[in-house]
Image (cartoon, helix red, strand yellow):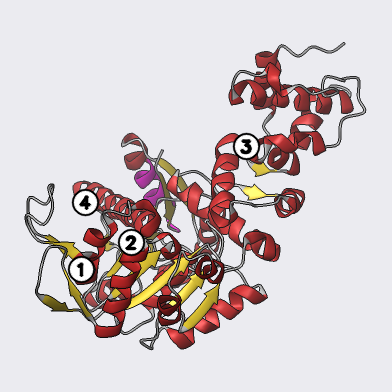
Amino acid sequence: MTTVLIIDDERPIRSSLRDILEYEDYKVLDVDNGEDGLKILKKEKIDLVLCDIKMNKMDGMEVLSTAKEFSDVPFIMVSGHGTIETAVEAARKGAFDFLEKPLDLNRLLITVRNALEKSSLVKETKVLKRKFSKTKEILGSSTGISLIKDTIDKVAPTEARVLITGANGAGKELVARWLHEKSSRAASPLIEVNCAAIPSELIESELFGHEKGSFTSAVKQRIGKFEQANGGTLFLDEIGDMSLSAQAKVLRALQEHKITRVGGEKEIDVNVRVIAATNKNLLQEIEDGNFRMDLYHRLSVILIHVPSLAERKDDIPTLATAFCEEICAEYSMPVKQITPDGMKALQSLPWTGNIRELRNMIERLIILCDKKITEVDVRMFANPESISSVPKSTGSSDSAEGFDFEQFTSFQDFKDYSECEFIKYKLEKNNWNVSKTADDLDIQRSHLYSKIEKFGLKRD
């Protein structure tokens, strides 16, 4: 339900506004001074504020200015002594609108609706920008990440080619994006090519384009990635998987800044900065005859190595917290907190999938866990195979002994079993004191009662 906060030192005004808004199915809170209003804004989820300008203790303009420092809730300012100067000042400080007393009912309701619609659109826009923006911040303060950030700042403004190395999921693509964003080519396109995802017989057509009729399925002319990136940046991801014939043509394009479409004869000038990335050891690939040494030296003017997550575990709290906020915003749910023990459990995991694996695990934990993500949650949901590493209870329940994963036909079955055993252990530990157990689990008593009923738990 939409919540409206009324801040006005006149009780009749507050009462009439409450009646009007509650009739329109809004939840209404009201206070008679600005200080209390600011306290409520900090503690409660408020969607809109109606604030009087002339009040004792703190006037409405001061309330508006203070609120805008920590909240983006829309304000509608109200005054019986309104002037054009006052309305302009309110708008300058961030108010959505200004209404004069006595209030016109229709104008009030229209203004409230418009303010709420604008606020909703602003929130949706922020969520969509976060969702679709691929150039996210490089998070972390470990030595390796700090070095990468410094290198990007130095290298990005130049035209130097960069070779980025590192394991899958470590963040090579993000480094490439920041190299482009901080370059003089940022206004031009960044074109990405995953060399590992394109069959070797099609990679040349993908990179350089082809003329109509150059091969059986070439029913029309195609512009290649080099031409699409003209004036901008071409990111060749997993370049270690590129065929030798395509490598030769890429080398020529880098040397001469010219390309020729497959099946064509005309040379086309291209102005492209190339950034490459690989998870392979290219020097070993050169020894094995799978990669050209001359291309390697053309690409590796600047070398940037992205460390694996296992090499930068001190950054896990920063990354996990950021992912929590981002994912909860995407799902429009309150941000869940990771307890200190839960964070230590995350840091203890091997992270073979690096940043990508961490984000997926945080999303899984947010979906499956209650208000807080604990060590038990991490062991149980983030990495079920490590459940045996959770200390077994010394209570009467011994079902965790000789744990057999084959007994479960689905992850939901395993989750229900684990949840039941954990709740049973906590109840027995607290001598079936439901209030104390609910506090231990950090859930509502009503939620615990429903779990007890769901699992058919009974005191022995």
The first of marks 2 and 3 along the sequence is 2
Span of residues in magenta: 9-18
Predominant SS along the magenta part:
helix
Q: How many marks?
A: 4
Q: Is residue 198 visible?
A: yes
What whole-number distance in Å separates the C-alpha atoms at marks 4 and 3? 48 Å
What whole-number distance in Å separates the C-alpha atoms at marks 2 and 3? 38 Å
Residue 198 x, y percent position in the rendering: 33, 53
Residue 253 x, y percent position in the rendering: 26, 77
Residue flagged by tag 3: what amino acid is it? Answer: Cys
Q: Would you name the residue on which mark 2 appears?
A: 193
**Callout 1 touching callout 2 (CB < 8 Å):** no
Disc 1 secondary structure class = helix
Disc 2 secondary structure class = strand
Q: Is residue 394 left or right of residue 344?
A: right
Q: Would you name the residue on which mark 4 appears?
A: 104
Disc 3 secondary structure class = loop
Q: Tell me what residue is drawn at x 32 percent, y 71 percent.
A: 248
Residue flagged by tag 2: what amino acid is it? Answer: Val
What whole-number distance in Å separates the C-alpha atoms at marks 3 and 1? 45 Å
In the picture, the quarter occupied by the C terminus is: top right
